[in-house]
């Protein structure tokens, strides 16, 4: 019996790496023999690769042509790359990140202690749980329904708990399939367009207009008050609508959302409503699409604990699909989504769900409002700064994003200049769509002192 | 099955139903793992400990630990490891990567996710009503006659070959020789193997624990695995996929580049808390603890194996996997399932749920508390 099997049959006292370390079929030895044959010529070892080994082996599997349509990496890893390169270039600079919308403030105790408690419970006989329901733990689904949709007629079994909005968006795309057409706001959060491309719903990217064929881009600019002129929008099966909006920060009014629901009804479309920033609303803009009468027949809603509870790394969100939302043949959309969730997913982490339950307790909601309030104060500071510098500033009232206008300039160049001269990372507007050109998104997540310092530096640069 | 279970409980409210059906772990997490998760969760409420978005591919530490624990000396680097929220999600993300034009081959019988995800993404074609088989899927029959390893000479070329070893549900772990055949087959056909090694830690003999033990596999195979059955993480949600740099599409484009793009676009990383738990389970102390849990389940499997053998039944698996595959020749697995449930109050899984080749089989899992396993054995012995 080899050494490794002796280790296996008795309890292991050595480290994990020894578990696998006993294999004699060493990869490295095998690898080197694939590439070169060493020959000896008068004491000198010459490596000669045979002609057949010069080109690397490829499979005969074609690359998914949809992947080839994507233009570059996903936007935020690109920003992260630029930031990293900048930090290498200026190792002593204190780089402040107001780029990727990443939360910075600690999660309230009431929430983390629930997660700690659940973690400990998993090591006990009574507290251990294995697979959970793919749709989420019953208590949590019920609590989300009552907290966010209390009197809107959305029930526990309409809620599907997930590991976050980004994953849900792709699962929704898998649900819809490759034959649907979609409309997005322009600018918008890149995951809607990118997931559409990956699913094969689009044609090629057209460099001249910076748009993918077959996607309907609904322009949102200062000229139309950041709400699209629906009379110019052609019919699509699916309409992605994010409000409060990332990146513009604009929150659609009740009147506007009523128009949107009407538009969807007339066209028989499905609205995918992204309400991830609803808790940032300061005025009386609706916080859920389901506040609009008739929305249950045309919309589903995606949301997340990321920006409410600092769960960007914990991973928890949900999608609400009303029973009334039906395909053209009368089949309930929720039934198919349930099938997707059961086949392509296995539930959100039970520890994260325990945190989620604490989030929607009375104490948790109060704590989340405090965190949100903190970021909203940051937003005000940033808005005031750019206003004082004479810029046209949008957003920042109902969302943790400030949308600053740099008319006639390339947003990547402005991004680069700001980074170079102030060591502050922002996000170039064109990363969110062609109508984002000429804008910079400044996110308001950050420690107060960093936000204040960033604003000082902006004032320096643009005084 | 849950529907049948509920019916049964209504009929026999006093019966103590034992579930040897769904493959769900039952034993609590080791203290060292649970406390690392609890501590990590707590640190998120501190200013210095708080972390937001993690790298979508997983924490560097964890990727390194996975590479070192499971792929040491196999040339797999941490940069080729993508941490996920579990194998089921990874399989669907791989299908998204491959797209709807791919043809796939699967073992028959097999746990349904490969087929179901293939159907959803549009690869599978129409279903043949009688057999339940899909037109575009190649089914590689695994049965006692071929010792649960498919006759590859009878298998048509497909772009992707899903291969699960140790196998769910048959429990068969392919030998080195058999895996060399699979790799050769893939090389000859220019196919990509998606190798599911979720049960590798249950192997008791010399069977390979990773496809990358086979020379040349890095050019033809992706490997998917999971902490679910290693560390009891079925509810915690953590797994990984390995995509070697050397794996190339026909045009030379590295598959890893596209998979990375999928991961960055369709996913946002596994929960940091789960990752902290994963890291703890691969520490010296943690791994020792998870191995003893695995041994516990393996002992369960031995007990059940002995039981079925003593009943004179043809039983397979149970040696390299936490599943037993029991043959009831000439029968219909749903009928056997029903009879076992009725007479012993034990839930199992009818083999036909795993494909046409499972028709005469019952899958019994070895996950469970020892006393339930022993009680189940007692009841089974008196069953016949």
Image: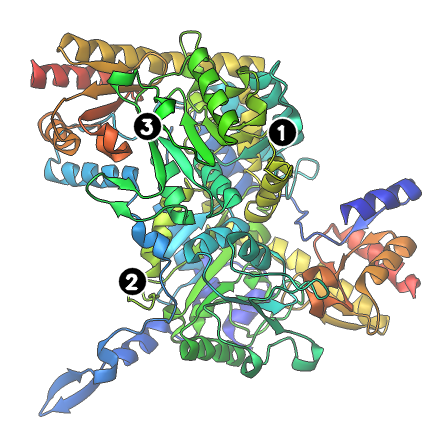
Instruction: Tell me which corner region of the image, top left, top right, bottom left or bottom right, holds residue A431.
Output: top left
* Residue tagged 1: A158
Q: How many marks?
A: 3
Evaluate whether residue B78 shows in this view: no
**Residue A278 in the figure: left or right of residue A131:** left
**Residue A405 in the figure: left or right of residue A278:** left
Disc 1 chain ID:
A
User: Which quadrant: the C terminus of chain A?
Assistant: top left
Do the residues marked 1 and 3 share a common chain?
A: yes
Disc 3 chain ID:
A
* Residue tagged 2: B253
User: Marks 1 and 3: CB-CB under 8 Å?
Assistant: no
Q: CA distance from mark 3 to mark 2?
A: 32 Å
**Residue A327 in the figure: left or right of residue A410:** right
Do the residues marked 3 and 2 share a common chain?
A: no
Please, is residue B329 above or below residue A292 in the view? Answer: below
Residue A41 in picture, x, y percent from top left: 11, 91
Residue B64 in picture, x, y percent from top left: 37, 53
Q: CA distance from mark 1 to mark 2?
A: 42 Å
Residue A101 numbered mark, or none? 3
In depth, the one of B279 and B16 nearer the eye is B16
Q: Secondary structure at mark 1?
A: helix
Q: Residue at x 10, y 29 (%)?
A: A417
Q: CA distance from mark 1 to mark 3?
A: 28 Å
Q: Secondary structure at mark 2?
A: loop
In depth, the one of A255 and A417 nearer the eye is A255
User: Marks 1 and 2: CB-CB under 8 Å?
Assistant: no
Q: Secondary structure at mark 3?
A: loop
């Amino acid at each position: 019996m080899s050494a490794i099997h002796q280790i296996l049959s008795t309890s292991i006292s050595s480290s994990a790496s020894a578990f696998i370390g006993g294999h004699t079929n060493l990869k490295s030895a095998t690898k080197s023999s694939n590439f070169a044959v060493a020959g000896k010529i008068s004491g000198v070892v010459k490596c000669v690769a045979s002609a057949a080994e010069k080109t690397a082996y490829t499979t005969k599997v074609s690359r998914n042509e949809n992947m080839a349509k994507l233009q570059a990496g996903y936007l935020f890893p690109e920003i992260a790359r630029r930031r990293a390169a900048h930090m290498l270039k200026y190792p002593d600079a204190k780089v402040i990140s107001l780029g990727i919308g990443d939360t910075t403030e600690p999660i309230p105790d009431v929430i983390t202690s629930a997660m700690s408690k659940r973690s400990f419970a998993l090591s006990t006989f009574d507290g251990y749980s294995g697979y959970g329901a793919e749709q989420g733990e019953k208590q949590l689904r019920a609590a989300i329904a009552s907290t966010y949709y209390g009197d809107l007629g959305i029930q526990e079994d309409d809620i599907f708990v997930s590991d976050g909005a980004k994953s849900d968006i792709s699962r929704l795309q898998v649900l819809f399939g490759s034959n649907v057409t979609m409309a997005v706001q322009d600018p918008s959060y890149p995951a809607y367009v990118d997931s559409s491309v990956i699913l094969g719903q689009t044609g090629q990217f057209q460099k001249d207009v910076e748009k993918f064929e077959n996607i309907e881009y609904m322009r949102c600019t200062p000229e139309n008050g950041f709400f699209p002129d629906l009379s110019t929008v052609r019919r699509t099966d699916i309409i992605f609508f994010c409000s409060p909006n990332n990146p513009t920060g604009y929150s659609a009014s009740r009147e506007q959302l009523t128009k949107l629901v009407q538009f969807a009804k007339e066209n028989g479309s499905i609205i995918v409503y992204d309400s991830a920033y609803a808790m940032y609303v300061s005025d009386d803009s609706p916080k859920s699409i389901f506040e609009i009468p008739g929305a249950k027949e045309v919309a589903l809603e995606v949301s997340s604990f990321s920006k409410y509870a600092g769960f960007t790394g914990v991973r928890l969100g949900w999608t609400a699909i009303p029973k009334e939302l039906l395909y053209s043949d009368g089949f309930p959309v929720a039934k198919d989504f349930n099938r997707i969730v059961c086949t392509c997913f296995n539930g959100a982490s039970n520890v994260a769900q325990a945190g989620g339950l604490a989030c929607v307790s009375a104490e948790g909601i109060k704590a989340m409002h405090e965190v949100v309030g903190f970021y909203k104060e940051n937003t005000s500071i940033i808005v005031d700064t750019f206003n004082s510098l004479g810029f046209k500033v949008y957003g920042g009232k109902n969302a943790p994003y400030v949308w600053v206008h740099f008319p006639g300039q390339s947003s990547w160049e402005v991004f680069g200049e700001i980074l170079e001269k102030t060591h502050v990372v922002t996000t170039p507007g064109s990363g969110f769509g062609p109508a984002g050109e000429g804008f910079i998104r400044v996110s308001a997540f950050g420690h107060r002192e960093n936000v204040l310092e960033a604003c000082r530096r902006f004032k320096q640069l643009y005084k | 099955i849950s529907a049948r279970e509920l019916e049964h409980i209504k009929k026999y409210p006093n019966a103590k139903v034992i579930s040897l059906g769904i493959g769900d772990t039952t034993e609590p997490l080791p203290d060292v793992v649970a406390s690392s998760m609890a501590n990590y969760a707590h640190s998120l409420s501190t200013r210095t400990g708080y972390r937001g978005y993690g790298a979508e591919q997983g924490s560097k530490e964890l990727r390194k630990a996975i590479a070192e624990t499971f792929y040491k000396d196999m040339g797999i680097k941490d940069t080729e490891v993508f941490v996920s929220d579990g194998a089921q999600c990874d399989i669907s993300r791989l299908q998204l990567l491959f797209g709807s034009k791919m043809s796939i081959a699967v073992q028959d019988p097999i746990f349904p996710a490969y087929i179901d995800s293939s159907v959803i993404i549009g690869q599978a074609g129409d279903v043949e009503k009688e057999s339940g088989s899909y037109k575009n899927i190649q089914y590689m029959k695994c049965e006692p006659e071929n010792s649960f390893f498919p006759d590859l000479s009878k298998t048509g070329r497909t772009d992707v070959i899903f291969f699960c070893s140790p196998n769910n549900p048959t429990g068969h772990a392919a030998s080195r020789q058999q895996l060399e055949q699979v790799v050769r087959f893939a090389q000859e056909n220019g196919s990509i193997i998606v190798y599911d090694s979720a049960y590798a830690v249950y192997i008791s003999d010399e069977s390979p624990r990773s496809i990358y033990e086979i020379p040349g596999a890095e050019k033809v195979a992706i490997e998917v695995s999971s902490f679910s059955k290693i560390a009891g993480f079925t509810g915690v949600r953590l797994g990984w996929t390995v995509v070697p740099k050397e794996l190339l599409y026909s045009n030379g484009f590295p598959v890893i580049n596209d998979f990375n793009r999928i991961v960055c676009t369709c996913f946002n990383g596994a929960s940091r808390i789960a990752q902290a738990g994963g890291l703890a389970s691969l520490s010296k102390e943690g791994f020792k603890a998870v191995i003893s849990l695995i041994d516990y389940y393996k002992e369960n499997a031995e007990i059940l194996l002995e039981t079925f053998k003593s009943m004179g039944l043809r039983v397979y698996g149970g040696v390299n996997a936490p599943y037993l595959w029991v043959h009831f020749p000439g029968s219909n697995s749903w009928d056997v399932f029903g009879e076992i449930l009725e007479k012993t109050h034990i839930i199992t899984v009818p083999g036909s749920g795993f494909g046409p080749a499972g028709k005469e089989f019952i899958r019994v899992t070895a996950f469970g508390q020892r006393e339930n396993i022993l009680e189940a054995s007692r009841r089974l012995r008196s069953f016949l």
